Image (spheres, helix red, strand yellow):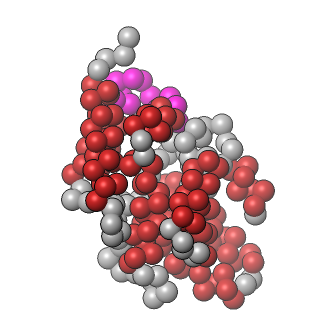
Amino acid sequence: MAAELQTRYSEPQRHYHTLEHISYMLRALELNGRGNETIELAIWFHDCVYDPVKGSPWNERESIRVFEEFADSTKSHTMAGLKESVSALIEATILHRLPDVLPERLSASEVAMFLDLDMSILAESPAVYETYSRQIREEYSQYSAESYRLGRSKVLQGFLLHEHIFLGPETEEMEQRARENIEGEITRLMIPST
């Protein structure tokens, strides 16, 4: 399965949702001092299907399908026990919020940590964030500048409407940086390209 995941994350339509994104999340998890098999599996599988044209929630639901087929194929009791929780984590990325109902083996703090890891690029330095925003634009290159500007602005405004972008404790500084980065991108999107 490792080779298949590497192939998937190396597909030509990907510029941000690549192995680099997975490595970034895994490093951040390690820096948090949290060895968590459920979160690690969710990191590996959460974007394994990525088609910018079909978009969300199709990508997430297909990623869950791929993960569940893999989990079933292992015929492992351990993997069977993780299946519902990993699927719930991937599904939570559709709306990037805590689900109303959690599987028995999954805590709200685990969901918050996973979602925060996925969103942590938003709180990076302005230079890193700008690279990320260019990579996202490349993934949506099939759209005209105007269509992309309108669609991306809507997504970014949606982030700003949330009371909290990050759900875990001690994320106030990340929250502020993310909001500054997002507002900066929105401003840049409003400037017509020449």
Residue drawn at x 42%, y 54% as measured from the top left: 119
* Foreground pick, 114 / 83: 114
Left or right of 80, for residue 74: right
Left or right of 96, for residue 60: right
Q: How far across and how far down the image is residue 194, in percent?
A: 38, 11
* Foreground pick, 114 / 47: 114
Q: Is residue 151 visible?
A: no
Q: Is residue 187 above or below residue 36?
A: above
Residue drawn at x 24%, y 48% as measured from the top left: 160
First to last magenta residue range: 136-149
Q: How far across and how far down the image is residue 42, in percent?
A: 56, 67
Residue drawn at x 49%, y 34% as measured from the top left: 131
The answer to if 145 sits in the magenta stretch is yes
Q: Is residue 15 visible?
A: yes
Q: How far across and how far down the image is residue 14, in percent?
A: 59, 40
Q: How far across and how far down the image is residue 62, in percent?
A: 56, 59
The secondary structure making up most of the magenta span is helix
Q: Quadrant of residue 73?
A: bottom right
The answer to if 84 sits in the magenta stretch is no
Where's the N terminus, which quadrant?
bottom right
